[in-house]
Image (spheres, rainbow, N blue to C red):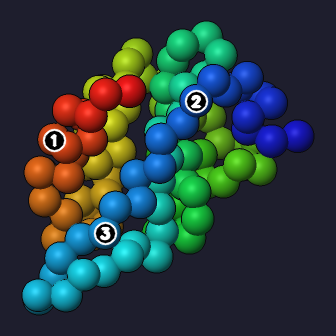
Amino acid sequence: MYTGSKYRTRMHYHLDWTYQEEGQRHFPRSRLMVVQAGDGRWYIEQECGDEYSGFAGVVKSDVDLVTEPNFYADLETVARAAFALMKQVYPAYKEEALDRFLAAPT
C-alpha cells in the first residue's frame, strides 16, 4: 500500500524548486510535496532524500504508512508550513519562490 491509497489522495504539488547560493543555482537533495487527501485536507510528504525525516508530521515517502501526518485545511496553509521546513534545511530559499507558487493558478 502507498500513501496515495491510504489517504485517497486527489492531487499534489512538488516543491522541488532550485535556489541560489553564492551565485550558483542548486537543486535540493531532499524535496517535499504537498498532497491533498481525499477528505480535502492537505499534508506534507518527503518526495526524496532524508533531510526532512526529523520533522514530526512529515510523511517520509510514499510508502511511509507509519508516520501520522500533520493535516492542514488548505493549499496556502500547507505550502507555508512546507516552505518553513524548506527554509530550515535550505536557508538560501527566498520568500519570492513561495509567493510565485501561491500566485500561480491551480
CB atoms of marks 1 and 3 within 8 Å: no
Instruction: Give the residue pinned by disc 1.
Output: 99
Give the camera-side residue of 2 and 64: 2
Amino acid bearing label 1: Asp
Residue at 18% of width from left, 76% of height from top?
A: 20
Give the position of the C terminus as an image quadrant. top left
Residue at 26% of width from left, 62% of height from top?
A: 88
Q: Tag on residue 18?
A: 3
Give the camera-side residue of 35 and 101: 101
Give the camera-side residue of 25 and 79: 25
Q: Position of residue 36 (x, y in %)?
A: 55, 26
Amino acid bearing label 3: Thr
Residue at 58% of width from left, 30% of height from top?
A: 11
Instruction: Give the residue pinned by disc 2.
Output: 11
Mark 2, other Cα within 10 Å: few <14 / some 14–19 / many ≥20: few
CB atoms of marks 1 and 2 within 8 Å: no
Q: Is residue 91 left or right of residue 47?
A: left
> For numbered disc 3, what is the local secondary structure?
loop
Q: Position of residue 41 (x, y in %)?
A: 51, 18
User: Disc 1 and disc 2: Cα gap in Å?
Assistant: 20 Å
Amino acid bearing label 2: Met
Give the camera-side residue of 86 and 95: 95
Check the image and name the residue furthest to the top: 39
Give the position of the N terminus as an image quadrant. top right
Q: Earlier in the sequence, mark 1 or mark 2?
A: 2
Q: Position of residue 18 (x, y in %)?
A: 31, 69
Q: Position of residue 95 (x, y in %)?
A: 12, 51
Q: Earlier in the sequence, mark 1 or mark 3?
A: 3
> For numbered disc 2, what is the local secondary structure?
strand
Q: Is residue 64 left or right of residue 75?
A: right
